[in-house]
Structures are given as structure tokens and as C-alpha cells.
Image (tube, rainbow, N blue to C red):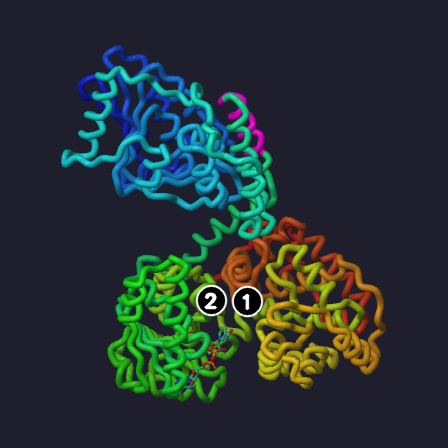
Amino acid sequence: MTSPVSTNIVDSIAIITMDKPPVNGLGHALRSGLLDAFQAATENSAVDAMVITSAGKLFCGGADITEFGSPAAGAEPSLPTLVNLIEESAKPVVAAINGMALGGGLELALACDYRFALPSVKIGLPEVKLGILPGAGGTQRLPRLAGVKFSLELITSGAPVNASKALQAGAIDQIHTKESPFLDAAIAYTKELLAKQSPVRSCATLSVDTSDIEEGYFDNFRKSIARRNRGLIAAEHCIQAVEAACELPLKEGLKKEGELFEILVNSYQSRSQRHLFFAERAATKIPGVDPRTPLRSINKVAIIGSGTMGGGIAMNFLNAGISTVLLDLNAEALERGVGVIRKNYEISAKKGRLSEAQVEERMALLQQTTSYDDIKDVDLVIEAVFENMEIKKSVFKTLDEVCKPGAILASNTSTLDVDEIAAVTKRPEDVIGLHFFSPANVMRLLEIVRGAKTADDALLTTVKIAQAIGKVPVVVGVCFGFVGNRMLEPYGREASRLLLEGATPAQIDRVLTEFGMAMGYCSMIDLAGIDVGYLTRQGNLENIAHDPSYSKLSDKLYALDRYGQKTGRGHYLYEGREQKEDPEVLEIAIATAAELNIERREISDQEIVERTIYTMINEGAQILDEGIASRSSDCDLVYTNGYGFPIGRGGPMQFADESGLDVILKRMNHYRTSLGEYGEMWFKPAPLLEKLVAEGQEFSQYVPNQS
Ligand code: NAD
């Protein structure tokens, strides 16, 4: 097997080149290759200095995370062993950073004596996003070179920075400016260092400059990032590691970093975050669709309906530089929609996130119209008119008449049958569901609904365009509510029923937010609109009408015009955004329970979690069994990106795997018996859940039959 590392000696400088496509992942093979090349150069008396660089576009993308949890991850030379050896080298080592240096790749560069970089490179330590910390010296060396403030931000945010910022902070020593090729310039730079007899510059001899760190700085920093962390522990461990860098000599600091790394890498949260990382990659592989299928080109898009969703959807395409036509039959609604888009951009400009020129560039890509004649030449249409089958059918009939052949015709419907919509056109193979979430310009989730006749190239094209506009696409099948809203149904049904059995909205919301949900169920429904929920239920009566208690409290609130935040009253009272408990809701709950002969009792927090989350998981099992989702991790992506499910738990299906499917099954059966007739109605375990428990399998191992 050829080594992924080659050495070329130019004058007295050994050029050590990493060549492990696609990203120079620091798996065992690359680490071994680097070690061998480095040791050979060290022992070669004709070599005075080393330059480490890459043959690819990236310098190095970091550790190979597919190795995590396998023996290869710890196999020597481990990354810490390798970088420590490089640092201790008696001959100077220069990192010639010719592309992105991320994670372990940056740690490798930090262990070198000097860093010479192309002006276009970015450096970053994204480990925190996987629930870990840079464990090969990043938390100890970066503060020594670039100070505490720069390091804390880079390490706890996981976001990369460009070369000029890195240079300013001291993380890079020199940027390539000369006209000569980069590698020649790196060699010249190394020769200059040798000529000036610049000392080898080990971080072991440096201490962290804390002169700009005021009293209480670390605690204030902790507070400032608490909100963006939402209970994730990795950032706190990163902070502790940087604090250690300030207090301890390098060797001891590295030991502390290693201990903190071990805690994180073995944590449930990190397993969950890594699960979601791989889930995103798996989601774009569609069973039965050849990934080499030629794509359709999308250069111009039309959105039909300029309401809440239409405007937000349009912004995604404008942000990506794609020409967009916004069509609404109601001229006033159209003006309003365009006005909201401009206002949103201007707010971003005020916050410094966009320049005025960028606002105008984006608005210039937007064309508004009330005429279908103006969308004849578009490549993709997304319909976002009222949620009404007859209206949608009439829109699709028109689209079929006016749109050019090969245009993809998509509906943003939340619940309606995409196949029924497709059937009114002469080209059902071009019809698909694109279910955006509100606010559509912010939420990352996009459910792509594959109709019975949707063509493979149309499907694959929408997956690619979703990625191009920064969404997380998840392909789902046709059913009421698709994956997200269908799994939400039992969750909401149980929360609502528990209000009749004795829980209060405040208790339900407290328990669910303590579990990690971004918002409690009652607050969420008050925000989304109790009226919206009521209308959705009217479209699903055949599945719920047999239960007289089904969302009965919500129905009562609806009848009292208590629609939630928009009317100032729902499950709570609202003054502006301030939420207060309302004794009247308790009275309504007590009266409704009496009407339905439901005995009220004290409800434990455990019962709230089990009845809402376990039934959601049970529905997920049913969805998998029906092939509506292709893999359990797709359900997890839907829930963590669209419904505020805690990232640290990896999504409902991953949470179930961690909890043990036998536990979920046991508790489903417990409630099936203990809740009497109601339990028999709603707590039947999904056959797939029973099957997996019997076979000792997990959801993550289940591969649906794709025939
Ligand atoms: P909305 O009422 O805010 O906007 C609908 C717009 O469509 C209005 O401006 C109306 O004038 C226009 N319209 C109606 N009939 C039309 C026609 N025949 N041709 C052109 N324009 C027409 O509705 P919304 O909340 O934006 O929802 C739109 C769609 O998105 C619905 O299918 C809804 O289920 C779905 N959806 C909504 C949300 C949400 O949270 N609001 C989330 C996901 C999906």
C-alpha cells in the first residue's frame, strides 16, 4: 500500500506532503505516514528544516471521526503523540497551510514552529459541534500563540476564521503575498528563518499572555454563551481547558486537556452530536436512487403565494443569489409580502449582518407579479397558497398549463396528499412536496415529500438545491403530516390529555423544557396558533373522532377565541411576550374532565415525559415500518432541526436507542393497561418496536425493506 505522505528534499529542506483525499483526514494511515516521514527527516543529516503541506485543496480537515470509538482512534501514533513529537523537534518545522486547516489539522499546524499560509485559507476548531474539544493540544497551544479571547471564541463557537484575523491574533505567522508559487515561497520563508537562525519555537517555552484578561472574564464569558449552548456541556469543558492553559505549564495543561477530552468523547451528548453529524450525510442518500443521476438545472425559481411562508421561502433563494419571482393573485398581499422581505433584510443590515449594497443586490433578484405569464421560464415553482386542496389543485392545473417542460412543481403543503395534487397535472413525475418550516428563512429543516410518481432526477435535484440554500433536506413519503407533524400528533395528544387528567400547562412546559425541548408543548401551540391546530384536526377527523377527549381542551380554547399569543390568550395569558398562568384554563380543564368522566389526579413528571416522548417514538417506529422515512436518523434530523428536540439527546429515535427499546416497550404496555380504555386506544406498541425488542436490535440498525 502506498503511503499517503511523501517527502521531497529541496536544498536542505524536507517537504513533507500529505495526500489523503478527500480532506486529509488524520486517520491511522495518515498519522503513521506523517510519523515515518518526520522521523526520516529528523535522522537525515542533509535536512536542516521541515515543511509540512498538503497536495489537495485542503491543508487538513482534522481527525477521522469515523474512527471514533474504534481501536484505530487510539492506535499509535495517536494525534497527540504525533504533534508532541513535532513540537519537540530540534530542527525547525514550518506548516505551509495551503487550504482549510480544521480541528486536528490546525492542531498539527500549531505544533509546528511557524505557520505560513495562503491569504484565502480559513482555520477553525469545530470539535465543539461534535460535543468534544480539540484534544491534540489545541486548547493549550492556541492560547499561547493567539491569546485567550481569540482562542475561547474560536474553540467554543466552532466557527472558522479567515487568514487575516488569524494573522492578527498570532495564530498564523506570515501570509503568502509574493508572486512566486506558494510552495516556493514557503521554502524561501523557511530558508530565511534558517539564515536568521530563528530559534525553534516550542509552545512549551511560552506562557499565555493574560494581561488583557480582566477579573471575572471567564465567568462572564460562560454567561454570554449559556443561551446558545442550551445545556450542551462541551463548551464548558473547552473553557476549563483554556483556563488550565493560563495556569499550568504545557505538559500539565495537555494532561488536563486529555482528561476533559475523555469525559466528553465518552458522553451521551457527544455520541448524540456525532450521530446527527453522520445523519446529515446519510440523509442525502436516497434508497433506490442512483446518486449519479444527472440533475436538472435550477437558475430561476417562482414562489406562488406571498404570505408568511412564501416570503420566507423566497428569501432562501435570494440569499443564494438565485433569481426569484414572487406571485400572488392579491396585489395588496403581494406588496405586503415584498415589504416584509425588504424589512427583514434591512433589520439584518442594521445589525451589521448585511451591507446596504447586499440588501439591494438581493432585492434586485426579486421580481413580483400577479400574472402566471411571468413564470413561464422558471425551473422550479414552489406553491405556498392557502392550505386547501381545491385551491391547490386549481393552482397546479394552471402551473401545468404555463410552466415549461421539465420544470419542477413543488407544494409547501403541511398535510395534504401530494399524490392527489400531482394527479391534476399531466406531469406527476415533476411534482414533489417541499415542506419548509416557519420562519422559512431561518429554520434549517426541509422535508422533501416524494410522491408515488416523482422522478428520481426531480427528487435528487431538490435535495441538491436544498443544500445549496443551506437547508437540511430529509426525504419523506406521503402520509398525513409526513414525518414531523405525524410524530408531533401523539406528543400533542398526550400533552393535551394530561391537562385533563390533572397536569397544568406550566407543569407540562417545565417538564418538557427540563427534558431539553426548546419550548414546552403549551407555549409552542400558543405561538403556532390554537386555531391552526384546530383546523389541522378537522383534516384528520377520521383518525381521531373515536376519542371524545382528543384535544378537547384545545377545542374549548378555540371556541373561546383563545388562539394563543396572537389573541393575547391561549393556554396562558400574554402581555406582549410575557406569559402568565391563567386560572380560567384550569377551570375549563376541570369542567371538561368532569364532562368526559376523567378522574383528575396528581401527574408525575416522569409520566409527562413518558407519555409524550414515548408515544412520539412509537409513531416514529410505525413511520419507519411504513417506509415513510428511510432510516431512523432521518426522524432524528427532522426533530432536532424542525421541532426543538434537544441536540444532546440526538433526536427521539437516538434517545430511544440510548434508553433501551425494551424500556420504551415496557412503558407503552404499562400505560396501555393502566389507562384503561384510553390506553387501549392509543398505547398499542408499534409492531416494529416489538420486533426490534424481540431481536435485541436498535432503531439505528434497522434497514427498511426497499423493494
Ligand atoms: P398565508 O395565508 O400567510 O399566505 C397565503 C398566500 O397565498 C396569501 O397571500 C394569498 O393571497 C395567496 N394565495 C391564495 N390563493 C392563491 C392563488 N390561487 N394564487 C396565488 N396566490 C394565492 O399562508 P401561509 O401560512 O404562508 O401558508 C402557505 C402554505 O404553507 C400552506 O399550505 C401551509 O399549510 C403551508 N405551511 C405553513 C406553515 C406556517 O407555519 N404558516 C408551515 C409550513 C407549511
Please report the bounds of the magenta region as a residue range. Answer: 250-262
Q: Element at badge 2?
A: strand
Q: Which residue is mark 1?
A: 484
Q: Is residue 364 left or right of residue 263?
A: left
Q: Is residue 586 above or below residue 468?
A: below
- Classify the position of ligand 1 by quadrant: top left, top right, bottom left or bottom right: bottom left
Q: Residues within 10 Å of mark 1 (few under 14, many from 20)?
A: many
Q: Label 1 to label 2, Cα distance in Å?
A: 8 Å
Residue flagged by tag 2: what amino acid is it?
Glu
Q: Is residue 407 above or below residue 602?
A: below
Q: Which residue occupies the extreme left position in the image?
A: 179
Residue 20 lies in the magenta stretch: no
N-terminal of the two: label 1 or label 2? 2
**Residue at horizontal 27%, vertical 66%?**
361
Q: Are marks 1 and 2 in contact (CB under 8 Å)?
A: yes
- Which label is found at residue 447? 2
Given residues 179 and 651, the one toward you in this image is 179
Image quarter of residue 362:
bottom left
Most frequent secondary structure within the magenta stretch: helix
